[in-house]
């Protein structure tokens, strides 16, 4: 009897252990019945089944199979769940606005809850009432966002800078893919780093070299900048802020900022502090100017550079600061993919603009508004760039319009496109596929800096213009290219935006512009 009771108890315990596993058992059969796979259901994202089988984990397209068994989920009951973590610059206003607008366009209702830095959005079907998606936002910092991705408590990182080499290495080693690859990032919106002072300040421009001197503490008095004889106060962001990290990388190049700087928790707080400080100066976001006054940057010659929607889109302003979404190298759920694709559409771009950022919709600039650039080109014409070369440029582009879609290359003379420009490849290709330019001519015009012989620079400009032209054609696989003419022109160093010997001149002079005729 005792033996029987022990056997009965063992059987009961075994039943308790295996029932949950059996509840997940499924059989996936091809629609013609020729193939059948059985196993325990690991997950279902509304599109793909993932099943633990005798062959190991398998992923099968739900459209190609029929699911039977106690573990089969109802497709209509699937709730897409994904988590974003990172900078409040994106998470505080912009991402909630994009989520709510997307939900409205899909006919979904939205409820929002917040607990400190954590926000949850539940998107539900208005007719049936059941949830369709749950989206979690964690508002921390870009650095913590990448750490959350590594810890698998986030699916997408909201970033106001590109990942550092050590972040790329750790994530690659952990199996998340190479986050430095263009396919892993999406430029969501554009912003810019701008110097600011209090309204009515007598200093109306700052040379980029002088700005670096201010940040490092080498310049401490306004009289050194043509202002009053008074000490200046430097305002900077917290060291953990992504924009401050970008400033340290792009402007200071390893140099330490002045320890006398006053630190602020965010760009809006910095702008407000500078606006109230007659002797203050700082670097903030274009999107968070508030009452502070932007100071134009100069480089010794050429026009003063001011950040605005047009100059940020073209990157003619040198300190553009894109805002990114980073995703690991894994297949995203269908709902997530559709949401990310929607971010490139005009309705989403208008939301981005209304939130105070620079959108990525294409604008046009008439040839007649190139006066400052042509004036600088004429002033610098000489033996290497004769007047005849400028006449050739005018003949090729007069009557055309420059698109704000511009392609620039990473600093240091690299031939690799920067993040903003890489995104422009896909945007221009999609426009070609949609027939936006049918009946017109697109001119890919290559330019360089003045470093080196003019004849060699002309060849480099052509090679880069051809590379961009070929990349756009390769991506625009569905475009009818018989309906649009694509041309390549090269003008080398003939049309500079800034002097090459300025801190940014070489970078912004190396470019491929797109003109529409």
Image (spheres, rainbow, N blue to C red):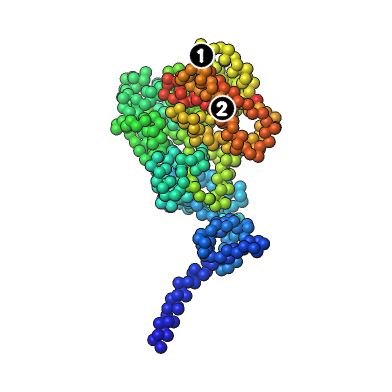
Q: Residue at x 53, y 65 (%)?
A: 39
Is 288 left or right of 478, judged from the image as shown?
left
Q: Which residue is mark 2?
A: 465
**SS class, disc 1:** loop
**SS class, disc 2:** helix
Q: Residue at x 70, y 32 (%)?
A: 483
Give residue 335's position: percent from left, percent from top: 56, 51
Q: Nearer the viewer, residue 228 or 59?
A: 59
Q: Quadrant of the N terminus?
A: bottom left
Q: Which residue is mark 1?
A: 384
Q: Residue at x 40, y 82 (%)?
A: 6
Is 326 left or right of 405, judged from the image as shown?
left
Q: Residue furthest left?
A: 259
Which one is earlier in the sequence, the residue at label 2 or at label 1? Answer: 1
Q: Is residue 256 visible?
A: yes
Is 177 left or right of 366, judged from the image as shown?
left
Task: Check disc 2: other Cα within 10 Å, few if <14, some if 14-19, many if 20+.
Answer: many
């Amino acid at each position: 009897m005792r033996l029987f009771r022990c056997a009965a108890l063992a059987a009961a315990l075994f039943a308790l252990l295996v029932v949950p596993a059996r509840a997940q058992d499924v059989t996936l059969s091809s629609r013609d019945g020729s193939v059948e796979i059985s196993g325990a259901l690991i997950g279902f994202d509304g599109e793909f089944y993932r099943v633990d089988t005798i062959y190991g984990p398998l992923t099968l397209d739900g459209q190609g199979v029929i699911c039977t068994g106690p573990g089969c989920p109802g497709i209509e009951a699937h709730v897409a769940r994904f988590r974003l973590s990172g900078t409040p610059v994106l998470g505080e206003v912009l991402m909630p606005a994009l989520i709510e607008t997307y939900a409205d366009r899909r006919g979904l209702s939205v409820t929002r809850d917040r607990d400190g830095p954590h926000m949850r959005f539940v998107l539900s079907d208005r007719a049936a009432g059941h949830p369709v998606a749950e989206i979690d936002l964690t508002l921390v910092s870009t650095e913590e966002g990448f750490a959350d991705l590594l810890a698998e408590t986030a699916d997408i990182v909201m970033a106001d800078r590109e990942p550092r080499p050590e972040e790329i290495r750790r994530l690659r080693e952990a199996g998340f893919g190479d986050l430095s690859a263009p396919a892993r990032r999406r430029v969501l919106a554009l912003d810019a780093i701008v110097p600011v002072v209090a309204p009515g300040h007598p200093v109306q421009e700052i040379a980029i070299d002088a700005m670096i001197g201010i940040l490092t503490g080498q310049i401490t008095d306004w009289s050194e900048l043509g202002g009053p004889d008074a000490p200046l106060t430097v305002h900077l962001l917290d060291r953990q802020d992504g924009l401050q990290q970008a400033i340290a990388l792009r402007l200071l190049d390893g140099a330490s900022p002045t320890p006398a700087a006053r630190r602020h928790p965010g760009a809006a707080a910095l702008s407000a502090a500078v606006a109230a400080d007659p002797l203050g100066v700082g670097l903030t976001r274009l999107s968070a100017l508030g009452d502070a006054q932007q100071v134009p940057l100069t480089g010794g010659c050429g026009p003063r550079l001011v950040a605005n929607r047009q100059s940020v889109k073209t990157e003619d302003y040198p300190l553009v600061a894109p805002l990114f979404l980073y995703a690991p190298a894994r297949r995203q759920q269908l709902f997530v993919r559709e949401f990310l694709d929607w971010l490139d559409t005009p309705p989403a771009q208008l939301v981005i603009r209304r939130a105070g950022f620079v959108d990525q919709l294409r604008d046009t600039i008439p040839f007649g508004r190139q006066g400052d650039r042509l004036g600088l080109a004429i002033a610098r014409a000489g033996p290497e760039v004769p007047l005849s070369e400028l006449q050739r440029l005018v003949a090729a582009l007069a009557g055309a319009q420059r698109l704000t879609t511009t392609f620039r290359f990473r600093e240091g003379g690299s031939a690799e496109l920067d993040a903003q420009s890489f995104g422009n490849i896909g945007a221009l290709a999609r426009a070609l596929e949609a027939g936006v330019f049918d009946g017109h001519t697109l001119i890919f015009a290559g330019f360089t800096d003045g470093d080196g012989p003019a004849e060699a620079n002309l060849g480099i400009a052509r090679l880069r213009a051809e590379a961009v032209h070929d990349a756009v054609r390769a991506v625009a696989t569905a475009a009818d290219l018989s309906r649009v003419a694509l041309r390549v022109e090269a003008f080398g160093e003939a049309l500079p935006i800034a002097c090459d010997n300025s801190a940014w001149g070489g970078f912004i002079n190396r470019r491929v512009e797109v003109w529409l005729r």
